[in-house]
Amino acid sequence: MTEFSDEGIVLRVEDRDTSDKYVTCFSRNHGRVRFVAYGARYQKSVAGRILQPFAHLNLELQTGNLIDKLRSCELQSLPVKYDFKQMAYAAVVTELTEVFTADHEPEEQLFLLLQEILRLINKRNPRLVTLLYTVKLLASTGFRPQMDECVLCHKGWADETKMFFSALQGGVLCEQCGKDEELMFGKGARELYYSLAKFELDKPTEFSVQGSDLMQLEKALLKFIVFQTDKPLKSLAYLSQIGL
Ligand SMILES: [Zn+2]
């Protein structure tokens, strides 16, 4: 058993038994880490109070065979305050991070992006910020959908007025190859995808967003994610349930 320290953002907290919390974090230098915080459910536990979703913590951990163990933790920075809607989107961001990353596989750029995105959620349109994160997360974890040309016949957008999106094929299809597909995917949605993929958080540029393009891109990525992960995401079900 070795000890290590790192900073991490809490993705999920699960209460177990009467006394313990099981926590999933995305850490700066160790990627996703899952650990148990013994006794964290007791009222007097300081760790228990700060082990909350979206918290940014300094962690002292001990590696374990199945799951790491928490030695101690403290707040790295004060938590961002979210309203109801912002919190629902932040939950999508953390759940997607958990699903598309692996334990102890460091990805510092993704950590920095996650940190910035969770700050932006209460400053900008949370729906667009979440979509921005989704596009970047898929690209950085090797799950980027093929948007440049038809996945099957490689016909480019220049030859097509109409394209479709196929979660099964993992990208866009031309009119011919996609005739049985339900999900239309227009040039606007594709342009939005590229604007988001290229968007640099430290050098933000303005771009306009059409509601219909946003919806098309969201739908396509949602289908793609459900197909890739093969399980429904709780946070997305919740979003649609509350009508956001
Ligand atoms: Zn084709």
Image: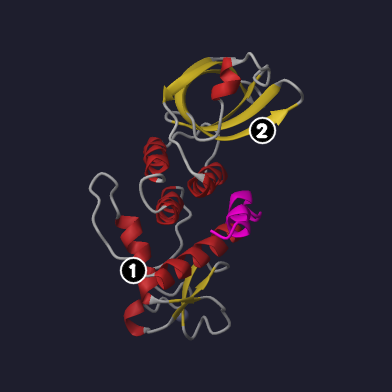
Q: Which mark is residue 14?
A: 2
Is the Cβ of the residue at disc 1 closer than 8 Å to that at disc 2?
no
Q: Quick one: 140 or 207, which is closer to the camera?
A: 207
Q: Can residue 170 be seen at all in this image of the molecule?
A: no
Question: Which residue carries the number 1 mark?
Answer: 191
Q: Is residue 64 above or below residue 220?
A: above
Residue type of the residue flagged with mark 2: Glu
Magenta residues, start to end: 228-244
Q: Nearer the viewer, mark 1 or mark 2?
A: 2
Q: Quick one: 42 or 154, which is closer to the camera?
A: 42
Residue 63 in the image: state x and y as whole percent: 58, 20
- Answer with the quarter of the image where residue 206 lies: bottom left
Does mark 2's beta carbon lie closer than 8 Å to ligand 1? no
Q: Earlier in the sequence, mark 1 or mark 2?
A: 2
Residue drawn at x 39%, y 79% as measured from the top left: 155
Magenta run includes residue 23 = no
Q: Can residue 29 be seen at all in this image of the molecule?
A: yes
SS assignment at label 2: strand
Q: Which mark is residue 73?
A: none
Residue type of the residue flagged with mark 1: Glu
